[in-house]
Image: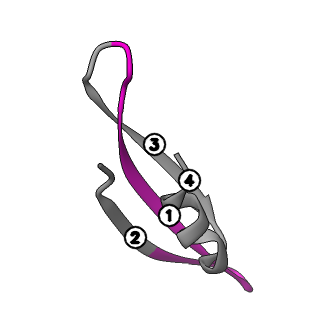
């Protein structure tokens, strides 16, 4: 189960997006958060991959 949070960031001439997803650990069952800053076109790929 992944929950998403997306924020738009602008630095100079580049437009970036910070995406956060919640990932369940297979060993302990606890949830952790994975953050990444990328271009807006790559957000859906990041959120869909496991």
Density class for disc 2 (Cα within 10 Å; few <14, some 14-19, many ≥20) is some
Relative vertical location of residue 11 with respect to residue 21 in this rendering, above or below: below
Q: Give the residue at mark 2.
A: 6
* Residue depicted at x 60% and y 78%: 40
Q: Can you tell which mark lies on residue 49? A: 4
Q: Give the residue at mark 1.
A: 18
Q: Distance between the residues labelled 1 and 4?
A: 16 Å
Q: Can you tell which mark lies on residue 34? A: 3
At mark 3, the secondary structure is strand
Q: Which of marks 4 and 2 is in front?
A: 4
Q: Distance between the residues labelled 1 and 2?
A: 6 Å
Q: Kindly indicate whether the residue at mark 2 contacts the one at mark 1 (C-beta within 8 angstroms).
A: yes
Q: Nearer the viewer, mark 1 or mark 4?
A: 4
Q: How far apart are marks 4 and 2 (CA)?
A: 16 Å
Mark 1 and mark 2 lie on one chain; the one further toward the N terminus is 2
Mark 2 and mark 3 lie on one chain; the one further toward the N terminus is 2
Q: How far apart are marks 3 and 1 (CA)?
A: 10 Å
Q: How far apart are marks 3 and 4 (CA)?
A: 12 Å
Coordinates of residue 6 in the picture (x, y in percent): 40, 70
């Amino acid at each position: 189960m992944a929950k998403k949070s997306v924020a738009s960031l602008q630095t100079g001439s580049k437009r970036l997006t910070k995406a956060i997803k919640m990932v369940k650990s297979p060993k302990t069952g606890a949830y952790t958060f994975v953050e990444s800053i990328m271009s807006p076109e790559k957000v859906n790929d990041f959120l869909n991959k496991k």
